[in-house]
Image (tube, rainbow, N blue to C red):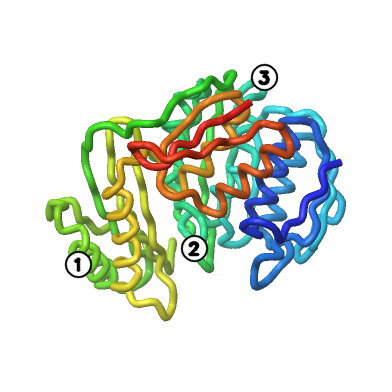
Amino acid sequence: MIIIDGSEGEGGGQVLRYACALSLLTGQPFTIQNIRGGREKPGLMRQHVTAIEAACVIGGAECSGLAVGSNSISFRPGRVTPGDYHFAVGTAGSTGLVLQTVLVPLMTADAPSRLVIEGGTHAMAAPPFEFLERTLLPVINRMGPTVSARLVRHGFFPRGGGRIEIDIAPAPLRRIECVDRGRAVSVQATAIVAGIPFDIAERELKSAQKILSGWPAEAFVTRQLPADQGPGNALLLEACFDNVTELVSGFGKLGVPAERLAATAARRMAGYLASDAFAGPYLQDQLLLPMAIARGGRFTTVKLSEHSNTAAALIERFTGSRFHISAGDNGNLVELIV
């Protein structure tokens, strides 16, 4: 039984998601205490409960202490069973983070799976659907499996109500190298609004354009969704290269001016573009687990986040493999050491 202090490292929900996935992949049970001890409101939230329930369903697992607000759980895995699954968060909690919990176990199963996940698709503190579709999954598919994703309906905070559908054709994971992002291909900035004034989108794009002044004017576009999918707002900044697409996002929030939201996102994109790294801060921690299961791989990235450091430490505890980080020509080089 592996004992985990949930307040260590990034101290949030990622510890739960990675622990469940690693438990299903290695067959090792775990207990986690002080769940989300590094957060202002510790304990399980609804999206964390849904993610763990999903892990239990696909993996025939038993979990004690599973309830909203719980500070401790014990998880004992069974056998991962592919199939058709439907999970509903019930809030605007992230559909993508629920997927993160079960994706790698199902990618290595012995038959295809189809997932329907309902909840938030564009909300604070999680990558949007477009990151899954355009950034993460193309890299995952280079490792052997074939995973496709569809956005059926947007889901913004606080209403939620979004829906994504995922098809997974599993295959043994193979080692890949993600060192060179390749030639720049295209850029785009998209401001999405639903059920809120349209000028918010225009103000966001104007603010982002000041920082990303090298982007062509036609790269800045607005998109208005039906009002019944809101209220909500998202700004998506996308830079496509031959070998990877980086996607930076910002989400509208009461009390946060559109200009400030856009400037923050644009500065983050400008920072990535100023580097030569393959992986941005969100992609880096999502590559660690599949590379660990593939027993090899390496990638270049910007400065490692606390999320990535926490994930790497958990992977070492469950698998014995560790990641070596060194300075390289294209940023930090992260390599798996078995």
N-term-proximal mark, 2 vs 3: 3
Circle 2/circle 1 CB separation < 8 Å: no
Name the residue located 24 percent from the left edge and 71 percent from the top edge. 203
First in sequence: mark 2 or mark 1? 2
| Residue 292 x/y as whole percent | 61, 30
Is disc 3 placed on a helix, strand or loop? loop
- Which residue was labeled with disc 1? 206
Question: Which quarter of the rendered picture does the C terminus lie within?
Answer: top right
The CA span between labels 2 and 1 is: 22 Å
In the rendered image, which quarter is residue 22 located in?
top right
Neighbourhood count class around disc 2 (C-alpha, 10 Å): few under 14, some 14–19, many 20 upward: many
The circle on residue 110 is: 3
Please say if the residues under marks 3 and 1 sit with CB atoms less than 8 Å apart. no
Q: Amino acid at mark 2?
A: Met
Q: Residues within 10 Å of mark 3 (few under 14, many from 20)?
A: some
Kind of residue at disc 1: Lys
Residue at screen point 54% across, 48% down: 96
Residue 267 is drawn in which quadrant? Answer: bottom left
What SS does tag 2 mark? loop
Q: Residue furthest front?
A: 327
Q: Amino acid at mark 3?
A: Asp
